[in-house]
Amino acid sequence: MAVLVNQLSKKYAEQQAVDGISFKVEKGEILGFLGPNGAGKSTTMKMLTCFIPPSRGSATICGYDIVRDPLEVKRKIGYLPENNPLYYDMYVREFLEFSLLMHHPNTKSKSGAQIKSIIDQVGLNDEQNKKIGQLSRGYKQRVGLAQALLHDPEVLILDEPTSGLDPNQLADIRHLIKELGKEKTILFSTHIMQEVQAVCDRVIIINKGRIVADDKPEQLQSRLSNKVAVEIEFEQTINLEEIQNIQHVLSAEKLSSKEFIVQGEDSIALRKALFAYASKKNNALLTIKQTSKSLEDIFQQLTNTTVS
Amino acid sequence: MPALLKKEISLFFSSLIAYISMGVFFIVLALNLFIFSGNILDANYATLDAFFTLAPWVLIFLIPAITMRTFAEEKQNGTIELLSTKPITDLQIVVGKYLAALFLWLITFLPTLVYFLAIKKLSLDNAPIDSGATWGSYIGLFFLGAVFVAVGIFSSSISNNQIVAFLVGVFLCYLMYDAFAQLSALPFFEGRIDYIIQSAGLNAHYDSISRGVVDTRDIIYFLTIITLFIIGTRTALESRKW
């Protein structure tokens, strides 16, 4: 087991940032860590990389405990922190040499070849003699990735590796992550759904510090899409509670005072029940439209707990 | 740690602060020693006393300027997270940064040995200069700077704003250097208490070493203060874990 997380929690002064999450990542798996901003993704990653200790719970990386063996854990991981902090006054090559020496102080002879191969891999060839501060955002991101990959770590922890990239760069970086995932265990966070669909073997959705879903992307989709969602519009105002009480309705979400999205298991029974209800109440049903659930909707449904 | 040391020094020299602070130190002291009124050429004594009296006051401002970036900038930019998640302990980070800053202080300090040679050459008929006291003073000044470096790094670790780090550093350096001596001079401290307060400050030990007697007690005092501030820095760095 590459990563094993058990009841990990982090409480800041006022706020429970991460609340008892547990999961495993197999060797060679790409795990997408998904959640809205402030869900606790970064905090979890900071704990796994030994930057901050957990308040409760434990985790191991390649068998090493994050609290007891931080140095061993840090040797096993490559980490790209949130917002990709870098030393802007350093040259690309100089910075990569520094990063490598921090991991392997005694491998000066080999370092040249190793750095060159990473520079090729992430596509920094033309930029390697520039100062990091002069690079565009996409290239800075590549430097951050190069820094995480350089020492050939077993586990890669990438905190929003694709944020702020243009579509071409996005595709490049995703492709790179996918390539890397053939050999390495990767845990990466994002709030972009397509990324998860494109790259991940498995996805964990986290919200308010808790895991709300943990599954393969396709299964997550099919698990929730055997429910049907129907968008409806009534002529007159109607309460959410009333809709929820209609037969076959499993859940309902209010869009406006007259418009709702309702979910049920049986599409036909659900729509029939809605019609029956409308005619009984003499409240005409103006729209009824079946909507398909994308992973995006699932994400919203799982993380949006403040339905008004 | 060697990698960290190298990075710190190379980053320092990639900024203008390095050249300005070192230049200012050398020039201010040279002006005062050789050119401004009351300079050594008018005084007709082959002694560097003027230099050793002024130098600590320049250092109070200069060293916090050298050290203000060390942690404040890393915290501001978030690179501290990058650094802390490399296989290195917090203490190694602090010591590495301390040694790098100490090296910078050494580079600033060494050119002032030229003053000594200049005065030796200028003295009539090779009149003897008090070498003992001069070397003692140089050693004292180096240790004084070494303490200020520790104080400066600590100040940088408690803020993520470089200006705040600089000002706190200046304040603490002043406090360590002169405040205890001033305090002991107040009339309500008498006898033994007076002496203890005075000994708590850097000034007393700097003066003592400057007389040309390198007393182990003074050296131990300097090393103790350095250690305390290094531990303080590590504590500040680890406060993210609380």
Image (cartoon, rainbow, N blue to C red):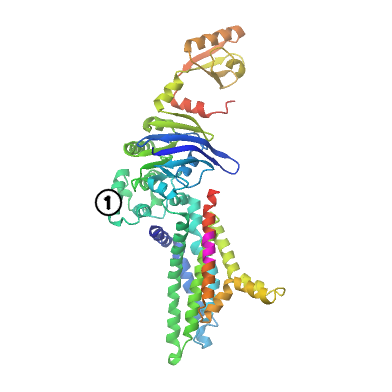
Going by the image, does A116 lie left or right of A51? left
Residue A252, picture quadrant: top right
Q: Is residue B161 above or below residue B135?
A: above
Which residue was labeled with disc 1? A113
Residue B229 covered by magenta stretch: yes
Residue B61 visible in the shown view: no
Going by the image, does B51 lie left or right of A164? right
Identify which amino acid the numbered label 1 is placed on.
Ala
Instruction: From the viewer's side, name the closer residue of B79 and A15.
Output: A15
Residue B120 location (% of width, % of height): 44, 85
Residue A79 covered by magenta stretch: no
Q: Quadrant of the N terminus of chain B?
A: bottom left
Q: Is residue B81 above or below residue A232?
A: below
Subunit ID for the residue under disc 1: A
Instruction: From the viewer's side, name the closer residue of B185 and A173.
Output: B185
Residue A76 location (% of width, % of height): 38, 46
Give the residue at the far right of this rendering. B188
Give the residue at the far bottom of this rendering. B125
Q: Decide: few, some or many residues near mark 1? Use Cα within 10 Å; few <14, some 14-19, many ≥20.
A: few
Residue A180 location (% of width, % of height): 33, 39
Numbered range of the magenta stretch = B225-231
Q: Name the residue rendered at 42%, 21% in the picture.
A: A222
